[in-house]
Amino acid sequence: MTTSKKQLTPQLIMAVVATGLLSFCGVIVETAMNISFPTLMKEFGVTTNVVQWMTSIYLLVVAVMVPLSAYFKRSFKTKHLFIVANLLFILGLVIDASAPNFTFLLLGRLIQGLGTGISLPLMFNIILEQVPQEKLGLMMGVANLITGIAPALGPTFGGLVVTGMGWRWVFIFLLPFLVVSLLLGIAGIQQPTPPQRGRFDQLSLCFIALLFGGLVTGFANLSGQPLISMAVGGAWLLGLLGLAGLTWCSLTLDQPLLDLRLLTNRRFHRILLMFFFTQLCSLGFAFLLPNYIQLVNGKSALVAGMVVLPAGFAGAVAAPVGGRLLDKYGARRPIVAGNCLMLLAIVLFTLLARQLTDGLVATVYIFYMFGMGMTMGSLMTSALTFLKDNQQTQGNAILNTLQQFAGAMGTSLVSVIVAASQRQHCQLVGTKVGTQEAFLFLLVLIVIILLTGLATLPKRAVAKQ
């Protein structure tokens, strides 16, 4: 499909909403279930390390599936992929809603991860392939709005449902959204280019599983196990071996599952660095602030979710704003402006970390999330602008893969920093000191993001390659 024939039709909007709803459900069930961990531990008689696999196994499956998205896109019809992903997610919800034991609960989360891993890149691939160039930033922003509002709603939704009706209703309530998504996708998803079945590289899949299995497991165990141990250092070593093997496959095969040769594009890999650090900071904040509100300010998980809720909405609303600015002025303005808002918020949080009231958290976090919302979609659009049309599906796979890994890494790193401080002081003082140290760590990352953007992003909009 050439650029001149691309139109923003009602069917295209239906397709974006359908795939966005599916991704939305994947994110919201993850954040909502985190609230239910104490309840699950009591009901099924499992420990903290075991119950955390509710999230870890989901992230691991998604991280393995997302790199396959370029092969799926090339080999199968988009509508068929969407239907399979949607039905898998529905199956996972039904299994979890009726799970008689914790093993079945994990099985349901694993199946949901399969569905999310297939669906997550679909929305962005549809936008990149079918949206007119002059509307690309706006639609990427809308896509990020759909998925970005889920982390804001998740903790509050989870707290209300778990407290009032029980944890199984978290899964039941999402079923109507999946049905609506399925119907919209069947009606709206089009196939502008016919699929061409290619060779599936099984060796690369093994290396991808080894890479993300090792890295995600290592980071998941980081807060509870020594660095020099098989659970952390050994897992990371396996992950690095997987990375070495995947790199070898990428450099030697004509159609690798994940084309790491794109990283030789200097501007693309710099934007990737910014995107990765931005996502890492976002998940770091998502852990630090509710944790602080509960442990230091003595509030419940539900109250903590309500405090950060307005900022989540701010971030979601900012996504299309940043996209519209990108379409009009280029990527530099929304990204740099968003980075400056993030920097202002993190400086205030760092200076006031030992005396954060709920009102202060709610107010300052709005500035951070608005800046982050302007930045994320613009970074994705900008990164893909530096690639050729036939490279964008692979570029999207790399972006979504990094996003999943950054999520696992961000939460683990800041939790380790806070936990180390808590071991040196009492819980109250340790949480305050550790939170301030974690803010300093995130501050360094945001400065790197801003400086990299100023050095990389052109002052004028870049024409599509």
Image (cartoon, rainbow, N blue to C red):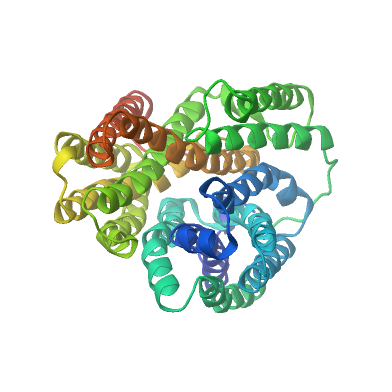
Residue 7 visible in the shown view: no
Q: Is residue 155 above or below residue 325?
A: below
Which image quadrant: the N terminus? bottom right
Residue 353 visible in the shown view: yes
Look at 71% across and 51% down and name the residue there: 73
Look at 63% across and 77% down and name the residue there: 183
State which quadrant residue 262 falls in.
Answer: top right
Residue 442, percent from left and from top:
32, 32
Residue 322, percent from left and from top:
33, 50
- In-front residue for pair 104/400: 104
Q: Is residue 371 above or below residue 95?
A: above
Look at 24% across and 42% down and name the residue there: 428
In the shown orientation, is residue 196 left or right of residue 242? right
Residue 431, percent from left and from top:
27, 39
- In-front residue for pair 306/263: 306
Look at 55% across and 52% down and name the residue there: 51
In the shown orientation, is residue 27 left or right of residue 63? left
Residue 84, percent from left and from top:
73, 64
State which quadrant residue 405 falls in.
Answer: top right
State which quadrant residue 138 falls in.
Answer: bottom left
Q: In this figure, what is the number of numbered marks?
A: 0
Q: Is residue 357 above or below residue 173?
A: above
In the shown orientation, is residue 107 left or right of residue 132? right
